[in-house]
Image (tube, helix red, strand yellow):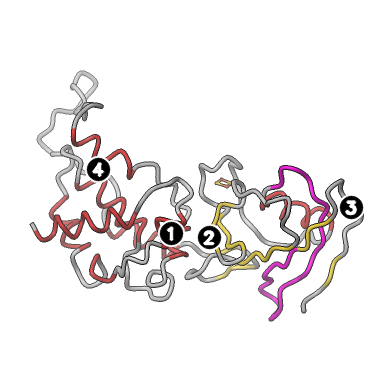
Amino acid sequence: MGKRHEAESSGAGGDLLVHVYRSDSADPAEFRVPRISPMMVLDVLLAIQRMHDPAIGFRFSCRVGMCGTCTVRVDGRSVLACQTEIDDSTERIRIDPIAGLPVVRDLVVNTEPFWQEWRSITPYLVPDPNDEVGMDAEPAQIRPDSEERTEIDPSLDCIGCAACFSSCGIASARRDFIGPAAMNRAMVLIADSRDTAGAERLDVVGGESGVDRCHYIYGCSVACPKGLDPARSIRRLRKRRLK
Ligand code: FES
């Protein structure tokens, strides 16, 4: 076992035993932190930092599930630390960095490989160069009640947290799979009638690193903290490519 740290005081609900991956040790460090209720995984990390080890490395920013920076694995599941509550009956947890990305320090990973895949599908809308632009131009819109909108809506709201990437055995194990988040984004843009780069994107997702690498284990869809279904997007991309 790694270093053992006792809590200075116990909260009303007793202590939670926490094992945390440390990049400077082969074994996880062990901490006891007083419980609060409700208690998020991020509360646990902040308590460890405050009470035991100011140098422990982890990331967070918004604390409301929007920035996607606080993703960690808790007992093997990739989750947002700020949105994941620890059940009152849980006595111990283990916290690790997300899988498939190089560890910088402790729970902090280098997300560049994830963003590299994201960039590969041209993750922004490419308008028709002949579209009228300027202050007076009427912006192209997709009607809220249109079929197109119905197709796109369930796949929006990705926050780039990489929980899907970490939960995908293929994306996290090798560097030549575009991965669920980028493919979900590709599907959103390909389905958008205002975009003109769909053919190029289909070429990318239909290539060697694309949709055919997916084995439909659905780890990505289970892990997504925003309730998106990247595996469904990959299926839809496959159909579009065949068309
Ligand atoms: S801190 Fe922003 S999503 Fe958790």
Residue located 18% across and 65% down the image: 206
Q: Nearer the viewer, mark 1 or mark 4?
A: 1
**CB contact under 8 Å: marks 4 and 2:** no
Q: Which is nearer the N-term, disc 2 or disc 3?
A: 3
Q: Is residue 125 left or right of residue 29?
A: left
Q: Identify the amino acid type marked 1.
A: Cys
Distance between mark 4 and mark 2 Cα atoms: 29 Å
Magenta residue check for 23:
yes
Q: Residues within 10 Å of mark 2 (few under 14, many from 20)?
A: many
Residue 17: x and y in percent read 78, 63
Q: Identify the amino acid type marked 4.
A: Leu
Quadrant (top left, top right, bottom left, bottom right) of the N terminus: bottom right
Q: Which is nearer the N-term, disc 3 or disc 1?
A: 3
Q: Which residue is mark 2?
A: 78
Q: Which mark is residue 10?
A: 3
Q: Identify the amino acid type marked 2.
A: Ser
Q: Residues within 10 Å of mark 3 (few under 14, many from 20)?
A: some
Distance between mark 1 and mark 2 Cα atoms: 8 Å
Q: Which residue is mark 4?
A: 125
Q: Residues within 10 Å of mark 4 (few under 14, many from 20)?
A: some
Residue located 51% across and 45% down the image: 67
Circle 2 SS class: strand
Distance between mark 4 and mark 3 Cα atoms: 52 Å
Q: Nearer the viewer, mark 4 or mark 3?
A: 3
Magenta residue check for 241:
no
Q: Nearer the viewer, mark 3 or mark 1?
A: 3
Q: Is residue 69 above or below residue 108?
A: above
Q: Residue furthest front?
A: 89
Quadrant (top left, top right, bottom left, bottom right) of the C terminus: bottom left
